Every structure is written in C-alpha cells, then in structure tokens.
Image: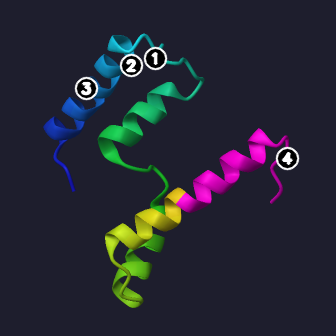
Amino acid sequence: MCDYAERRQRLQAFVRSQAENGLPVRTHPDSHLLNDWVLYGPRDARIEQLVSRLALDHGLRVAEIEDLIVAALGRRLAELANGDQWVE
C-alpha cells in the first residue's frame, strides 16, 4: 500500500497530466470522493473484505484481483455506453 505522500504525488501528477494534455479535470458531485479514492482507497469496507478473502482464502494474487475489478468496471462502462440502465 502506498503511503499518503506517494498517493498525494500520484494525484497531483494526474491533475498536471490532464492539464498538460489539454484535458479538463472533470467536475463531478463526488469529485472529492474520487480524489480520496486515489489517496486513501475505497471507503466501503466490503471491498477490502472481499479483496482479503480472494487473496487469503483463495490464493489470488493482487494482480488477479485488480484484473477482476478492471473487467467488472469495463463491462459496466460498456453497458452504459450501449444505453443499458443499472439493474440490481
């Protein structure tokens, strides 16, 4: 896990790169939470619990868990791009 200073540097580098490439830093009602995600990780303790169970109980490596997260978020983004609505 990164320490606070490293996470803050990563966030600042991201904001700088957006500006340098002419991309706006988008505003969003949850932008402070999104920024905190970069600095502190997810707020929902269930995410940490699920990650821990996958790693410790089932032997998945962090890279495998990150691949699962990326795949799930990518599928959701594709659904939204196709006009699908959220279904729980």
The quadrant where residue 1 appears: bottom left
Q: Which mark is on residue 84?
A: 4
Identify the mark nearer the N-term, 2 or 4: 2
Q: Position of residue 58 (x, y in %)?
A: 42, 89
Q: Is residue 26 magenta?
A: no
Mark nearer the N terminus (2 vs 3): 3
Whether the magenta-drawn stretch holds residue 76 is answered as: yes
Q: Which residues are magenta?
A: 71-88
Tell me which amino acid carries mark 2.
Gln
Q: Type of residue at label 3?
A: Ala
Q: Which residue is mark 1?
A: 25
Kind of residue at badge 1: Val
Q: Earlier in the sequence, mark 4 or mark 3?
A: 3
Image spot of residue 50 (x, y percent): 48, 72
The answer to whether marks 2 and 4 mark residues whose Cβ atoms lie closer than 8 Å is: no
Q: Secondary structure at mark 1?
A: loop
Q: Which residue is mark 3?
A: 13
Q: Tell me, yes or no, whether the two marked residues, 1 and 4, touch with CB atoms within 8 Å.
A: no
Q: Secondary structure at mark 3?
A: helix
Prevailing secondary structure of the magenta residues: helix
Residue at position x 46%, y 17% in the image: 25
Label 4 SS: loop
Q: Residue at x 60, y 60 (%)?
A: 72
Is 6 displayed left or right of 59 in the figure? left
Q: Secondary structure at mark 2?
A: helix
Structural distance between the alpha carbons of marks 2 and 1: 6 Å
Residue 55 visible, this orientation = yes
Q: CA distance from mark 1 to mark 4?
A: 26 Å
| Residue annotated with mark 2 | 18
Measure how far apart labels 4 and 3 are at the Cα level. 34 Å
Eyeballing the image, is 2 above or below 52?
above
